[in-house]
Image: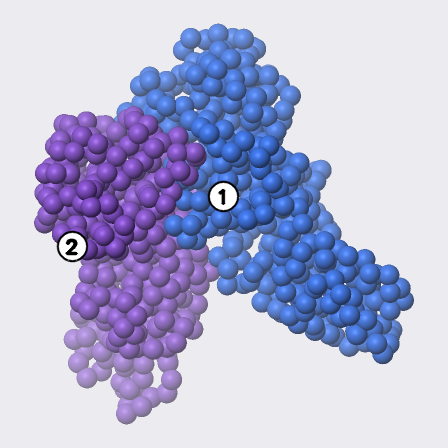
Chain colours: A blue, B purple
Amino acid sequence: MNKVGVAILGLGVVGGGTYKILTENHDFYLKTQGVDIAVQSVLELDRERARVLGVPEEKIASNIAEVICNPDVNIVVECIGGVGAAKDFVLDALNTGKTVVTSNKELVCKFSHELERAAKRHNAGLYYEASCVGGVPIIRTLLDGLQANRIGSMMGIINGTTNYILTKMTNEGASYEEVLREAQRLGYAEADPSADVEGFDAAYKLSILSSLAFHTKVPLSKVFREGISGISAKDIAYGKDLGYVLKLLAIGKQTPAGIEVRVHPAFVKKEHPLASVNDSFNAVFITGDSVGDVMLYGRGAGSLPTGSALVSDVIYAATHSENKYSTFKNNATAEKDVTFVSDFRSAYYMRLTVSDRVGALSKITSILGKNDVSIVEAIQKGVASSGCVPLVIVTHETREHAIRNAVAKINALEGIVKVDSVLRVVS
Amino acid sequence: MNKVGVAILGLGVVGGGTYKILTENHDFYLKTQGVDIAVQSVLELDRERARVLGVPEEKIASNIAEVICNPDVNIVVECIGGVGAAKDFVLDALNTGKTVVTSNKELVCKFSHELERAAKRHNAGLYYEASCVGGVPIIRTLLDGLQANRIGSMMGIINGTTNYILTKMTNEGASYEEVLREAQRLGYAEADPSADVEGFDAAYKLSILSSLAFHTKVPLSKVFREGISGISAKDIAYGKDLGYVLKLLAIGKQTPAGIEVRVHPAFVKKEHPLASVNDSFNAVFITGDSVGDVMLYGRGAGSLPTGSALVSDVIYAATHSENKYSTFKNNATAEKDVTFVSDFRSAYYMRLTVSDRVGALSKITSILGKNDVSIVEAIQKGVASSGCVPLVIVTHETREHAIRNAVAKINALEGIVKVDSVLRVVS
């Protein structure tokens, strides 16, 4: 496959960037990769958008049939997004034996079984580096760079919007609402920000990445998810005093009890390599049994970074004859035999408002103790106002259900104490 | 190639680690990679070493002929090191059509032409991920993850020994000699440390990595090299006051004037992702035209991390039918057409001892000005003792030859001023 025809579906931000990279670098790829890649077709309902990019009129298709029936098209790059038309078009392409390269995390996360079945049946390739962490080649690394390892854990900052918001809140002491509004004004957050701030976007990506890392399909439904919309600037500041930085983490672990996958805000020690990943940058920190700790860092979104991943996949597909189907690679453990752990272990940070009545603290520690939660430190923050003091507690590692039980019991001590926030601490 | 026989040449630290990984994970690779990898032969003069690792007697070869004539051996993993026997054995293996996987940076750096010619001629593979940055898949990333990009620059901390020494000097204010002695005692530095501390090891790796990044052979002779043996704790401390951390950097740049490759100590801003790469950890910071900034971080040495890279290459070779010859990939620019820049641009840090005679400072600034060196800041450190004061100057970006000329002229002002140290500053 030394002469390769590409079709791009959707010429939005990412599709437009991909068109630009492919056309501007035609000669560069010919020289350095030995492959002659030409865009043969684009599918974009807004034909004006295609014209502005300089796509020749005869290459603008009117429907998917024109694209997949075009014998000059070998590889279809899907940049539409979502699981409506994108899913149909990707299946159409695979079913006619065209290799698909996509940046669509929701599609890959939810329908990888179906897509891989179609790809295998028709001997087509299926590549989705661009679906996770933008231009950072994390999928290539898991498949072709660290494959000698049993991956024990991965911890990632894999959503740029939330990392931008948390970085701003940390550096400026601003509230979540303030920073979100600014991010929306600057175009870093959507008008409806929930996909990002509630962790859905990170959960899709974690489902994909942990499926590859742990050699089994990790369904979205198994990913525990908690967003950042309830985060208070106060907790970020108190955490800072304790030497922690708050990040929205996506965590996947292979434990003796099973696979653990979760997306939630968490405090990390300020010396941890993930703590200095700021603004809209992303990073994934992986621990393998042979390689030890490895971290990949870069831009997790944007037209050119995501385009870089799409085009690198196009070149890979064009220069390798084997199609590799990663999620179901060979005889990897079938999904049904896999146990997922929901009652995971973590250390915790709690902020409480305690009445300064004698005995309040001893009641709290007694409840924690009975629920198998032991305290690393308890710090009174500021002085009593209106008879109440804020109290911060950091615990040793315990189980999620133990903390939930303890919090419910503490909150039942009405009039004496209220738990204002509970955050996980990564050690 | 679903059943693959491996031979390991040399069972030292890395070869031993590789044997351990391959044998312990046989079933894991069968399940997750669909490939049955068995160690069929080892070549190790110290047969006792092989026995201790549990190698069956009949698999211990007595000479290279036994290895390369063994029809069950498809892939030869070279862990001998150096360019004596290792070179002969690797060529023997390639010349009989066996794929070679090696961790030998000196061999790949100095003889890649010869090795690749032999590999091509006999349709054998040649893989050397383990030669650079241990288990971090930096070569796979350049070849198969960022290949859509024109790489503008790479900056790496790619020698663990020197990073361990500089980190200790930074954190403890200790002298180079003190820390080196401790590193030697702990086995982090060799009895003759020059390969590491004088930058030879980093220069080999930079030659390999920049050849791949810039799609042309970058010979070792073109790499500017300066080590850390002359570094004073005083400069590290003064740099810290200015917000800098000192690292031994390997820098490769594609500039309009040509390719620039250099290994030397340099100050980086403490906010730069490379500044927090500490102890024996390594990292490479790459800037591509589409992907932007990407960083890979991990352990650059050690038996299992390096073994991870070797075994990942073995699996890659076993599961891909195309052999890719990277340095001379296709029609990449031939070496003779490439210009290398030796008079590179950088900002500089200078420490001088100045007599407090009137006019000394104006003489210095006049010399700098005449040599096209402009000053960002000049700070007097401490108070005059015996009629002399230490002065620290940070310059704007200028050319290396301009600084050298200026320093020579300043040092000629005998009795008035002496330049104690000059360090590059990465901006």
A181 and B109: which is toward the camera: B109
B103 and B14: which is toward the camera: B14
Looking at the picture, does residue B63 appear above or below residue B407? Answer: above
Which residue is pictured at 46% across the width and 50% down the height? A287
Residue B252 position within the rendered picture, expressed as x and y whole percent measured from the top left: 28, 48
Residue B186 position within the rendered picture, expressed as x and y whole percent measured from the top left: 30, 70
Which residue is pictured at 49% across the width and 40% down the height? A213
Which residue is pictured at 51% across the width and 49% down the height? A153
Which residue is pictured at 72% across the width and 57% down the height? A402
Residue B49 position within the rendered picture, expressed as x and y whole percent measured from the top left: 21, 55
**Is A310 placed left or right of B395 in the picture?**
right
Q: What amino acid is at disc 1?
A: Arg
Of badges 2 and 1, nearer the viewer stands 2
Q: Which mark is residue A299?
A: 1
**Residue bearing mark 2:** B46
Tags 2 and 1 both on a single chain: no
Q: What amino acid is at disc 2?
A: Asp
Quarter residue A392 falls in: bottom right
Q: Callout 1: 10 Å neighbours few (<14), some, many (20+)?
A: many
